Amino acid sequence: MESMNTLKAICVYCGSGPGNNPKFVESARAFGAILASNNIRLVYGGGSIGLMGAIADSVVDHGGQVTGIIPDFLKAREMMFKRAQEMVVTRDMHERKRLMFERADAFVALPGGVGTLEELVEQMTWAQLGRHKKPILMANIDNFWDPLCALLDHMRDMQFIRDGLTVAPLVVNTIEEIVPALQAATRHISESEKEMKTVEPERL
């Protein structure tokens, strides 16, 4: 099966709150079920609240596998998820991000706040600098990411994103499109191209 070959684990960035649109939690739950049914492991920030908790609960509820990666100082604030088959507690955010990168074949951003945005943009930056070729996807649920897409277009128009510095995250509007889009994107990426090119990622 194609998903077995190209996508074994997906790192999902999303809010530690639920947001005020019910579609956000519904989408997180739906994506969790899709991950489980495709035998794709969820790699995420390890929390049990908000969209983070919704997707992790859904993966486990549907028989899937969860790896949570959480820094020690956030264990209480984000209420560490107790049902994960694997929970890694890190010293700091840098180690957390590094492990999330290493464990995943692709990155998906569901709706979220500044932390979600920061993680998404950091992966885009590393890709732009040629550090990896793992696909990065924005799940544009109810047009949540439209302002960021517009900003990226604006940066291109202003020639801050230019030839040699291209960044082209995938954008889909429904949860059902995520896995097929990532499968298509990963099909031609070699194992060596997936790896981070530096021993230690840049601390931007």
Image (cartoon, grey):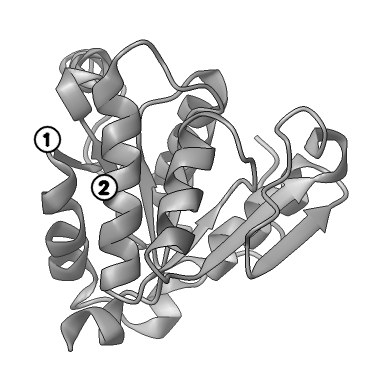
Which residue position holds label 1?
A: 173
The label number, if any, that marks residue 197 in the structure image: none
Q: What residue type is labelled 2?
A: Ala
Could you tell which of marks 1 and 2 lies nearer the N-terminus?
2
Please rate how many residues cluster around mark 2, counting C-alpha atoms within 10 Å: few if below 14, some from 14 to 19, many from 20.
some
Residue 83 horizontal side relative to residue 185, left or right: right
Residue 85 horizontal side relative to residue 41, left or right: right
Residue 66 screen position, x and y as percent:
54, 64
Residue 24 screen position, x and y as percent:
31, 27
Which residue position holds label 2?
A: 30
Whether residue 93 appears in this view of the structure is yes
Q: Nearer the viewer, residue 25 or 149?
A: 25
Please rate how many residues cluster around mark 1, counting C-alpha atoms within 10 Å: few if below 14, some from 14 to 19, many from 20.
some
Secondary-structure class at tag 1: loop
- The residue depicted at 34 percent of the width and 44 percent of the height is 29
Q: Which of 39 and 120 is in front in this view?
A: 39
